[in-house]
Amino acid sequence: DSPFNRHSQQEVSAVCSISSGNEDPFTICSRDSPVCEWVVGLCVAQLDEPEFDSLISSTSSTHHNRIQLELPGTCSHTFQQPRTQLIHFTNTSIYASTMTSASQRPVELEQHTKSMQNETDPTQSIMDEISSDSMKSDSRHNIRVGYAAHPKDTSSKKYKSGEDAFCIENSDAGLFLAVFDGIGGLHSENIDPADYSHYLAQTCGDFFKTYGQSNLRTLLQKSYEHHAPTGMKGATTVVLAKVHNNNLEVLNLGDSGAMVFRPSGEGFTKVLRTKEQDHRFNAPFNLSTFAGESGHFADGPGDADEYQVKLAPGDVVVLMTDGITDNLFTEQIGGILDSADVNSENFPEKVCQKIIDEADTFSRSNKATPWSTKCGKNGGKPDDMTVVLCQIME
Protein backbone atom coordinates (compact mmCIF):
# COMPACT_ATOMS: atom_id res chain seq x y z
CA ASP A 1 0.00 0.00 0.00
CA SER A 2 2.99 2.29 0.02
CA PRO A 3 2.87 5.34 -2.26
CA PHE A 4 6.45 4.49 -3.21
CA ASN A 5 5.09 1.56 -5.23
CA ARG A 6 2.58 3.50 -7.29
CA HIS A 7 4.69 5.94 -9.27
CA SER A 8 6.57 5.86 -12.54
CA GLN A 9 9.80 7.50 -13.52
CA GLN A 10 11.22 8.53 -16.86
CA GLU A 11 14.64 9.96 -16.13
CA VAL A 12 17.12 9.88 -13.28
CA SER A 13 20.67 10.97 -12.73
CA ALA A 14 22.37 11.42 -9.39
CA VAL A 15 25.69 12.60 -8.06
CA CYS A 16 26.60 12.27 -4.38
CA SER A 17 29.73 13.55 -2.68
CA ILE A 18 30.92 12.44 0.75
CA SER A 19 33.65 14.30 2.61
CA SER A 20 36.92 12.44 3.10
CA GLY A 21 37.13 10.55 6.34
CA ASN A 22 33.37 10.38 6.74
CA GLU A 23 32.59 7.08 8.47
CA ASP A 24 28.82 7.37 8.08
CA PRO A 25 27.05 4.91 5.77
CA PHE A 26 26.28 5.51 2.14
CA THR A 27 24.05 3.20 0.14
CA ILE A 28 22.68 2.81 -3.39
CA CYS A 29 19.94 0.19 -3.71
CA SER A 30 17.45 -1.03 -6.29
CA ARG A 31 13.70 -0.58 -6.35
CA ASP A 32 13.24 -3.98 -4.69
CA SER A 33 14.81 -2.67 -1.51
CA PRO A 34 12.42 -1.90 1.34
CA VAL A 35 11.92 1.85 1.57
CA CYS A 36 8.60 2.07 3.39
CA GLU A 37 10.39 2.89 6.63
CA TRP A 38 11.86 6.02 8.18
CA VAL A 39 15.39 4.64 8.27
CA VAL A 40 18.22 6.45 10.01
CA GLY A 41 20.19 8.66 7.67
CA LEU A 42 18.54 7.57 4.44
CA CYS A 43 17.60 9.63 1.44
CA VAL A 44 15.06 7.50 -0.42
CA ALA A 45 13.93 7.65 -4.04
CA GLN A 46 11.69 4.72 -4.96
CA LEU A 47 10.98 4.12 -8.63
CA ASP A 48 8.80 1.61 -10.44
CA GLU A 49 11.31 1.09 -13.24
CA PRO A 50 14.03 -1.36 -12.03
CA GLU A 51 16.68 0.03 -14.35
CA PHE A 52 16.47 3.36 -12.55
CA ASP A 53 17.87 2.22 -9.21
CA SER A 54 17.83 5.17 -6.88
CA LEU A 55 17.90 4.66 -3.14
CA ILE A 56 20.59 7.14 -2.17
CA SER A 57 21.70 7.67 1.37
CA SER A 58 24.40 9.00 3.63
CA THR A 59 24.65 10.55 7.05
CA SER A 60 26.54 13.46 8.56
CA SER A 61 26.09 16.32 10.98
CA THR A 62 25.15 18.83 8.30
CA HIS A 63 24.08 18.70 4.69
CA HIS A 64 23.04 20.76 1.73
CA ASN A 65 20.63 19.24 -0.79
CA ARG A 66 20.27 20.33 -4.38
CA ILE A 67 17.30 19.05 -6.32
CA GLN A 68 16.17 19.89 -9.82
CA LEU A 69 12.64 18.91 -10.74
CA GLU A 70 10.61 18.78 -13.91
CA LEU A 71 7.04 18.81 -12.68
CA PRO A 72 4.20 17.95 -12.00
CA GLY A 73 5.44 15.34 -9.60
CA THR A 74 4.44 11.70 -9.51
CA CYS A 75 7.40 10.07 -7.78
CA SER A 76 8.20 10.15 -4.10
CA HIS A 77 11.42 10.23 -2.16
CA THR A 78 12.36 10.92 1.41
CA PHE A 79 15.14 13.17 2.62
CA GLN A 80 16.57 12.63 6.02
CA GLN A 81 20.31 13.22 6.10
CA PRO A 82 22.37 13.19 2.91
CA ARG A 83 25.73 14.95 2.91
CA THR A 84 25.85 16.60 -0.48
CA GLN A 85 23.86 15.59 -3.51
CA LEU A 86 22.67 16.82 -6.87
CA ILE A 87 19.70 14.89 -8.22
CA HIS A 88 17.75 15.44 -11.40
CA PHE A 89 14.33 13.80 -11.42
CA THR A 90 11.48 14.02 -13.89
CA ASN A 91 8.32 14.01 -11.77
CA THR A 92 9.19 14.25 -8.11
CA SER A 93 7.89 15.08 -4.67
CA ILE A 94 9.71 15.50 -1.40
CA TYR A 95 8.86 14.09 2.00
CA ALA A 96 11.21 14.64 4.90
CA SER A 97 11.70 14.28 8.59
CA THR A 98 14.24 16.31 10.51
CA MET A 99 17.47 14.52 11.26
CA THR A 100 20.23 17.02 11.94
CA SER A 101 20.75 20.53 10.61
CA ALA A 102 19.52 20.46 7.04
CA SER A 103 19.00 23.08 4.37
CA GLN A 104 17.40 22.69 0.97
CA ARG A 105 18.70 24.39 -2.11
CA PRO A 106 15.99 26.41 -3.86
CA VAL A 107 13.82 24.56 -6.34
CA GLU A 108 12.65 26.82 -9.15
CA LEU A 109 9.20 26.04 -10.51
CA GLU A 110 8.41 27.95 -13.66
CA GLN A 111 4.73 28.78 -14.01
CA HIS A 112 4.27 28.34 -17.73
CA THR A 113 4.45 25.49 -20.21
CA LYS A 114 7.38 24.52 -22.38
CA SER A 115 9.31 21.33 -23.06
CA MET A 116 12.23 20.37 -20.84
CA GLN A 117 15.49 19.82 -22.67
CA ASN A 118 17.32 16.62 -21.77
CA GLU A 119 20.13 17.05 -19.29
CA THR A 120 23.38 15.45 -20.45
CA ASP A 121 25.47 16.61 -17.50
CA PRO A 122 23.84 16.03 -14.11
CA THR A 123 26.40 18.28 -12.45
CA GLN A 124 25.48 21.40 -14.39
CA SER A 125 23.85 24.31 -12.61
CA ILE A 126 20.72 23.25 -10.79
CA MET A 127 19.40 26.78 -10.92
CA ASP A 128 18.44 26.53 -14.59
CA GLU A 129 14.76 27.26 -15.20
CA ILE A 130 12.48 24.30 -14.69
CA SER A 131 9.38 23.80 -16.80
CA SER A 132 6.01 22.76 -15.49
CA ASP A 133 2.48 22.27 -16.78
CA SER A 134 1.23 22.84 -13.27
CA MET A 135 0.00 26.06 -11.74
CA LYS A 136 -0.84 27.55 -15.15
CA SER A 137 -0.94 31.31 -14.91
CA ASP A 138 -1.41 34.26 -17.19
CA SER A 139 1.84 35.68 -15.86
CA ARG A 140 5.21 34.04 -16.34
CA HIS A 141 7.35 33.74 -13.25
CA ASN A 142 9.24 31.25 -11.12
CA ILE A 143 8.81 29.98 -7.61
CA ARG A 144 11.86 29.11 -5.56
CA VAL A 145 11.46 26.70 -2.66
CA GLY A 146 13.87 26.02 0.19
CA TYR A 147 13.85 24.39 3.59
CA ALA A 148 15.95 23.96 6.72
CA ALA A 149 15.48 21.66 9.69
CA HIS A 150 17.15 20.99 13.02
CA PRO A 151 16.10 18.49 15.72
CA LYS A 152 16.32 19.20 19.42
CA ASP A 153 17.57 15.79 20.48
CA THR A 154 17.81 12.39 18.84
CA SER A 155 19.43 10.33 21.60
CA SER A 156 16.27 8.60 22.84
CA LYS A 157 14.15 8.47 19.69
CA LYS A 158 13.44 5.26 17.83
CA TYR A 159 14.08 6.83 14.43
CA LYS A 160 16.96 9.00 15.64
CA SER A 161 15.04 11.85 14.10
CA GLY A 162 13.07 14.84 15.25
CA GLU A 163 9.33 14.87 15.71
CA ASP A 164 8.83 17.41 12.90
CA ALA A 165 8.16 16.36 9.32
CA PHE A 166 7.42 18.25 6.11
CA CYS A 167 6.32 17.78 2.52
CA ILE A 168 6.93 19.62 -0.76
CA GLU A 169 4.79 18.44 -3.65
CA ASN A 170 3.86 19.76 -7.08
CA SER A 171 1.09 18.64 -9.41
CA ASP A 172 -1.39 20.06 -11.90
CA ALA A 173 -3.28 21.43 -8.90
CA GLY A 174 -0.38 23.63 -7.82
CA LEU A 175 2.51 23.73 -5.40
CA PHE A 176 1.84 22.04 -2.06
CA LEU A 177 3.85 22.74 1.10
CA ALA A 178 3.23 21.32 4.56
CA VAL A 179 4.84 21.05 8.00
CA PHE A 180 3.88 18.75 10.86
CA ASP A 181 4.97 18.67 14.50
CA GLY A 182 4.46 15.43 16.41
CA ILE A 183 2.95 16.08 19.84
CA GLY A 184 5.32 15.22 22.68
CA GLY A 185 4.35 13.92 26.09
CA LEU A 186 3.27 10.55 24.71
CA HIS A 187 6.38 8.60 25.68
CA SER A 188 4.66 7.42 28.87
CA GLU A 189 2.17 5.64 26.60
CA ASN A 190 5.04 4.03 24.67
CA ILE A 191 4.34 6.22 21.63
CA ASP A 192 7.06 7.82 19.52
CA PRO A 193 5.68 11.30 18.66
CA ALA A 194 7.55 11.18 15.35
CA ASP A 195 5.52 8.26 14.00
CA TYR A 196 2.30 10.04 13.15
CA SER A 197 3.78 13.33 11.94
CA HIS A 198 5.98 11.41 9.49
CA TYR A 199 3.09 9.25 8.34
CA LEU A 200 0.69 12.16 7.81
CA ALA A 201 3.31 14.15 5.88
CA GLN A 202 3.73 11.28 3.46
CA THR A 203 -0.02 10.65 3.19
CA CYS A 204 -0.94 14.30 2.56
CA GLY A 205 1.71 14.61 -0.14
CA ASP A 206 0.59 11.44 -1.84
CA PHE A 207 -3.10 12.37 -1.64
CA PHE A 208 -2.38 15.82 -3.09
CA LYS A 209 -1.75 14.14 -6.44
CA THR A 210 -5.32 12.83 -6.39
CA TYR A 211 -7.22 15.44 -4.39
CA GLY A 212 -5.12 18.54 -5.06
CA GLN A 213 -7.97 20.23 -6.92
CA SER A 214 -10.02 20.09 -3.71
CA ASN A 215 -9.59 22.62 -0.94
CA LEU A 216 -7.02 21.89 1.73
CA ARG A 217 -9.60 20.99 4.35
CA THR A 218 -10.94 18.22 2.12
CA LEU A 219 -7.40 17.04 1.41
CA LEU A 220 -6.61 16.93 5.13
CA GLN A 221 -9.88 15.15 5.91
CA LYS A 222 -9.19 12.42 3.35
CA SER A 223 -5.61 12.04 4.57
CA TYR A 224 -6.79 11.88 8.18
CA GLU A 225 -9.41 9.26 7.38
CA HIS A 226 -6.87 7.11 5.56
CA HIS A 227 -6.08 4.15 7.79
CA ALA A 228 -2.71 4.44 9.47
CA PRO A 229 -0.58 1.28 9.73
CA THR A 230 -1.84 -1.14 12.37
CA GLY A 231 -0.68 -0.16 15.81
CA MET A 232 0.44 3.35 14.87
CA LYS A 233 -0.64 5.97 17.38
CA GLY A 234 0.18 9.61 17.74
CA ALA A 235 -0.82 13.22 17.29
CA THR A 236 0.50 16.13 15.28
CA THR A 237 -0.10 19.78 14.50
CA VAL A 238 -0.59 20.60 10.82
CA VAL A 239 0.08 23.51 8.47
CA LEU A 240 -0.83 23.03 4.80
CA ALA A 241 -0.35 25.56 1.99
CA LYS A 242 -1.19 25.50 -1.71
CA VAL A 243 -0.04 27.99 -4.35
CA HIS A 244 -2.02 28.02 -7.60
CA ASN A 245 -2.50 30.82 -10.13
CA ASN A 246 -0.94 33.32 -7.71
CA ASN A 247 -3.46 32.36 -5.02
CA LEU A 248 -2.30 31.07 -1.66
CA GLU A 249 -4.50 28.85 0.50
CA VAL A 250 -3.36 28.01 4.03
CA LEU A 251 -4.87 25.61 6.55
CA ASN A 252 -3.56 25.65 10.11
CA LEU A 253 -4.36 23.38 13.05
CA GLY A 254 -2.32 23.93 16.20
CA ASP A 255 0.58 26.13 17.21
CA SER A 256 2.84 25.84 14.18
CA GLY A 257 2.16 28.51 11.58
CA ALA A 258 2.55 30.29 8.28
CA MET A 259 3.55 33.83 7.40
CA VAL A 260 3.53 35.85 4.19
CA PHE A 261 5.88 38.79 3.70
CA ARG A 262 5.72 41.31 0.85
CA PRO A 263 8.49 43.61 -0.40
CA SER A 264 7.95 47.16 0.81
CA GLY A 265 10.53 49.86 0.29
CA GLU A 266 13.87 48.59 1.57
CA GLY A 267 12.44 45.59 3.36
CA PHE A 268 9.42 43.33 3.84
CA THR A 269 6.00 43.87 5.37
CA LYS A 270 3.98 41.08 6.97
CA VAL A 271 0.67 40.47 5.17
CA LEU A 272 -0.32 37.23 6.92
CA ARG A 273 0.42 35.53 10.23
CA THR A 274 -1.73 32.54 11.12
CA LYS A 275 -3.20 32.44 14.60
CA GLU A 276 -2.04 29.82 17.08
CA GLN A 277 -4.73 27.40 18.23
CA ASP A 278 -4.36 26.17 21.81
CA HIS A 279 -6.78 24.51 24.22
CA ARG A 280 -4.64 25.82 27.06
CA PHE A 281 -0.99 26.62 27.68
CA ASN A 282 1.24 24.13 25.85
CA ALA A 283 -1.76 22.11 24.63
CA PRO A 284 -2.21 22.89 20.92
CA PHE A 285 -5.00 21.74 18.66
CA ASN A 286 -3.91 18.57 16.86
CA LEU A 287 -4.92 15.61 14.75
CA SER A 288 -4.56 12.30 16.56
CA THR A 289 -5.31 8.62 16.19
CA PHE A 290 -7.19 8.69 19.52
CA ALA A 291 -9.29 11.85 19.13
CA GLY A 292 -12.13 11.96 21.63
CA GLU A 293 -10.84 9.14 23.80
CA SER A 294 -10.65 9.73 27.53
CA GLY A 295 -8.01 12.31 28.32
CA HIS A 296 -7.52 13.39 24.71
CA PHE A 297 -8.93 16.29 22.67
CA ALA A 298 -11.34 15.64 19.81
CA ASP A 299 -9.86 18.03 17.24
CA GLY A 300 -10.40 17.35 13.56
CA PRO A 301 -9.78 18.93 10.15
CA GLY A 302 -12.95 20.97 10.61
CA ASP A 303 -11.31 22.82 13.50
CA ALA A 304 -8.45 24.15 11.38
CA ASP A 305 -8.34 27.84 10.44
CA GLU A 306 -8.28 28.68 6.73
CA TYR A 307 -6.60 31.69 5.11
CA GLN A 308 -6.53 33.08 1.55
CA VAL A 309 -3.94 35.49 0.13
CA LYS A 310 -3.52 36.87 -3.39
CA LEU A 311 0.21 36.61 -4.03
CA ALA A 312 2.36 39.14 -5.87
CA PRO A 313 5.87 38.90 -7.33
CA GLY A 314 8.43 39.13 -4.56
CA ASP A 315 6.18 37.64 -1.88
CA VAL A 316 7.73 35.15 0.51
CA VAL A 317 5.65 32.39 2.10
CA VAL A 318 7.10 30.77 5.23
CA LEU A 319 5.78 27.65 6.97
CA MET A 320 7.33 26.70 10.31
CA THR A 321 6.82 24.55 13.36
CA ASP A 322 6.61 25.94 16.87
CA GLY A 323 10.32 25.41 17.39
CA ILE A 324 10.58 28.62 15.35
CA THR A 325 7.48 30.52 16.45
CA ASP A 326 8.18 29.92 20.16
CA ASN A 327 11.66 31.39 19.86
CA LEU A 328 11.43 34.17 17.27
CA PHE A 329 8.97 37.04 17.08
CA THR A 330 7.42 37.82 13.70
CA GLU A 331 9.49 41.01 13.54
CA GLN A 332 12.70 39.00 13.92
CA ILE A 333 11.78 36.76 11.00
CA GLY A 334 10.94 39.83 8.94
CA GLY A 335 14.31 41.30 9.88
CA ILE A 336 16.08 38.20 8.57
CA LEU A 337 14.30 38.67 5.25
CA ASP A 338 15.19 42.37 5.23
CA SER A 339 18.89 41.61 5.56
CA ALA A 340 18.97 38.87 2.90
CA ASP A 341 19.79 39.33 -0.78
CA VAL A 342 16.46 38.60 -2.47
CA ASN A 343 18.18 38.36 -5.86
CA SER A 344 20.52 35.59 -4.74
CA GLU A 345 19.70 32.25 -6.35
CA ASN A 346 20.00 30.57 -2.95
CA PHE A 347 17.91 33.17 -1.11
CA PRO A 348 15.40 30.55 0.18
CA GLU A 349 18.15 28.28 1.47
CA LYS A 350 20.04 31.07 3.21
CA VAL A 351 16.93 32.56 4.80
CA CYS A 352 15.69 29.19 6.05
CA GLN A 353 19.06 28.37 7.57
CA LYS A 354 19.34 31.82 9.16
CA ILE A 355 15.89 31.42 10.72
CA ILE A 356 16.94 28.04 12.13
CA ASP A 357 20.22 29.45 13.47
CA GLU A 358 18.54 32.42 15.14
CA ALA A 359 15.76 30.31 16.64
CA ASP A 360 18.28 27.81 17.98
CA THR A 361 20.30 30.62 19.59
CA PHE A 362 17.26 32.16 21.26
CA SER A 363 15.98 28.76 22.40
CA ARG A 364 19.07 28.43 24.60
CA SER A 365 19.16 32.05 25.78
CA ASN A 366 17.58 33.90 28.70
CA LYS A 367 16.25 36.63 26.42
CA ALA A 368 12.63 37.52 25.80
CA THR A 369 10.95 35.19 23.32
CA PRO A 370 7.37 34.38 22.32
CA TRP A 371 7.68 31.37 24.62
CA SER A 372 8.73 33.56 27.56
CA THR A 373 5.68 35.79 27.08
CA LYS A 374 3.49 32.69 27.42
CA CYS A 375 5.14 31.18 30.48
CA GLY A 376 6.03 34.43 32.24
CA LYS A 377 9.81 34.15 32.44
CA ASN A 378 12.65 34.98 30.08
CA GLY A 379 14.19 32.34 27.90
CA GLY A 380 13.42 30.23 24.87
CA LYS A 381 12.27 26.67 24.36
CA PRO A 382 14.61 24.07 22.84
CA ASP A 383 12.61 22.10 20.30
CA ASP A 384 12.69 20.50 16.86
CA MET A 385 12.76 23.25 14.24
CA THR A 386 11.54 23.16 10.64
CA VAL A 387 11.12 25.92 8.03
CA VAL A 388 9.79 25.61 4.48
CA LEU A 389 9.86 28.76 2.34
CA CYS A 390 8.78 29.69 -1.16
CA GLN A 391 9.70 32.89 -2.98
CA ILE A 392 7.43 34.19 -5.75
CA MET A 393 9.73 35.47 -8.49
CA GLU A 394 9.14 38.16 -11.10
Image (cartoon, rainbow, N blue to C red):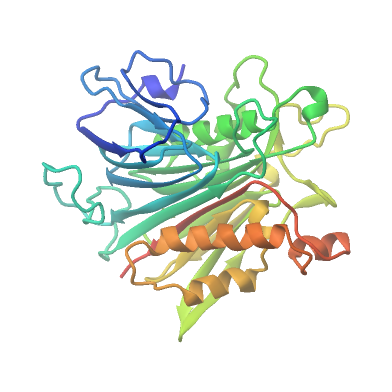
Left/right placement of residue 27 relative to residue 81 reads: left
Q: Quadrant of the C terminus?
A: bottom left
Indicate the position of residue 63 as horizontal and vertical percent values.
44, 45
Number of numbered discs visible in the structure rendering: 0
Indicate the position of residue 362 as horizontal and vertical percent values.
69, 63
Q: Quadrant of residue 224?
A: top right
- Residue at the extreme front: 21
Residue 240 drawn above or below residue 33: below
Q: Looking at the image, which residue is at 86% across and 59% down? A: 375
Residue 168 drawn above or below residue 376: above
Q: Is residue 216 visible?
A: yes
Q: Nearer the viewer, residue 44 or 111?
A: 44
Q: Quadrant of residue 343?
A: bottom left
Q: Nearer the viewer, residue 368 or 288?
A: 368
Q: Looking at the image, which residue is at 25% across and 17% down? A: 50
Q: Looking at the image, which residue is at 43% across and 27% down? A: 25
Indicate the position of residue 349 as horizontal and vertical percent values.
42, 58
Q: Is residue 242 visible?
A: no
Q: Nearer the viewer, residue 238 or 23?
A: 23
Left/right placement of residue 285 relative to residue 89 reads: right
Indicate the position of residue 81 as horizontal and vertical percent values.
47, 37
Residue 273 drawn above or below residue 231: below
